Amino acid sequence: MTAHPLFDICGRTALVTGSSRGIGLALARGLAEAGCTVVLNGRDGDALAKAAAALPGEQVHTAAFDVTDSAAVAAGIADVEERVAPLDILVNNAGMQLRAPLTEFTDTDWHRILDTNLTSAFLVGREAARRMTGRGHGKIINICSLQSEVVRPGIAPYAATKGALKMLTKGMCADWGPYGVQVNGLGPGYIDTELTRPLVEDEEFSAWVRRRTPAGRWGRTEDLVGGVLFLASPAADFVSGQVLYVDGGMTSVL
Ligand code: NDP
């Protein structure tokens, strides 16, 4: 038996920002396994080449650019469309975390986290949507967070960026929906990656995550693939402006 045609995304072209490692790399692998032409992005060309070599399929490309740099984003997207193919799917995944009490958070760090987690989705999304809306179709998936909904001490700026990203997702849906582009968010729970390594290594915190999550464990990067494949597929053609939380149930319980 084959998969339902509504879930068929074979032959589509997808750009995943921040895919040299972690969640982005797992999502890129999932899209490649589904038959997509995949473009990996990050700032480090060598890391991207290494990541691309480990992915399945012939159609894996790299595009090194900084998603916080407007000119670099414009040039990067133009280059991908010319060198690879017109983009059907964009996953705005690049992001960072900075943990500090709010009173000690510096101006520099505030702008850095805002640029990396929020402005990047605006810049890359705008550039991709200028092309997708002209063609009359496209899927944009913004990687939000359970912290789009809830927050803990020490991560207010991160939660602010992810809460705003949720509203940016809804705004993009409003603006670009009439032109055939669906925009949704995917909100991971606690996932074991480089970004959360200090938390994974903190025994007490790690045990708290397991206790607090109905599924009873930390998330794995592969846990997020199904949600992204769904949101990228024709099965989600009438789904837009939503955030799908993939968090083992954590955002639903006290
Ligand atoms: P990682 O730190 O493992 O990976 C981040 C990726 O983003 C890397 O590929 C990095 O590559 C890239 N990146 C960072 N800054 C830039 C930039 N300015 N331009 C281009 N690429 C950049 O993080 P995760 O995989 O854990 O997180 C991925 C996304 O998922 C983030 O948006 C994060 O907020 C979100 N998320 C993660 C959760 C978790 O528990 N891990 C939970 C909820 C959400 P390089 O540094 O080489 O440029």
Image: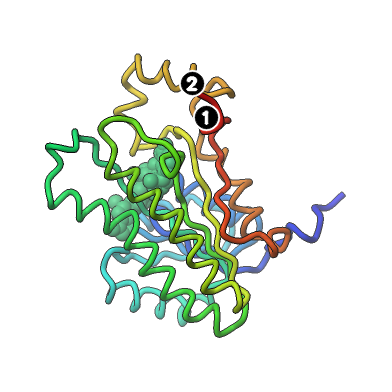
Three-letter code, disc 2 = Arg
Residue under the image location 25 percent in, 51 percent down: 113
Q: Nearer the viewer, residue 208 or 36?
A: 208
Reading the image, the residue beneath label 2 is 212
Residue, far bottom: 134
Residue under the image location 62 percent in, 60 percent down: 232
Vertical arrangement, residue 119 with respect to residue 106, above or below: below
Residue under the image location 27 percent in, 76 percent down: 71
Q: Would you say residue 22 is visible in this rendering?
A: no
The mark that comes first in sequence, 2 or 1, is 2
Work out how far the residue at label 2 is from the one at label 1, CA to CA, in angstroms.
7 Å
Q: Nearer the viewer, residue 159 or 53?
A: 159
Q: Position of residue 161 (x, y in %)?
A: 34, 51
Reading the image, the residue beneath label 1 is 250
Residue 241 image label: none
Three-letter code, disc 1 = Met
Find out whether the residues at labels 2 and 1 contact each other: C-beta distance under 8 Å.
yes
Is 102 on the left-hand or right-hand side of 17?
left
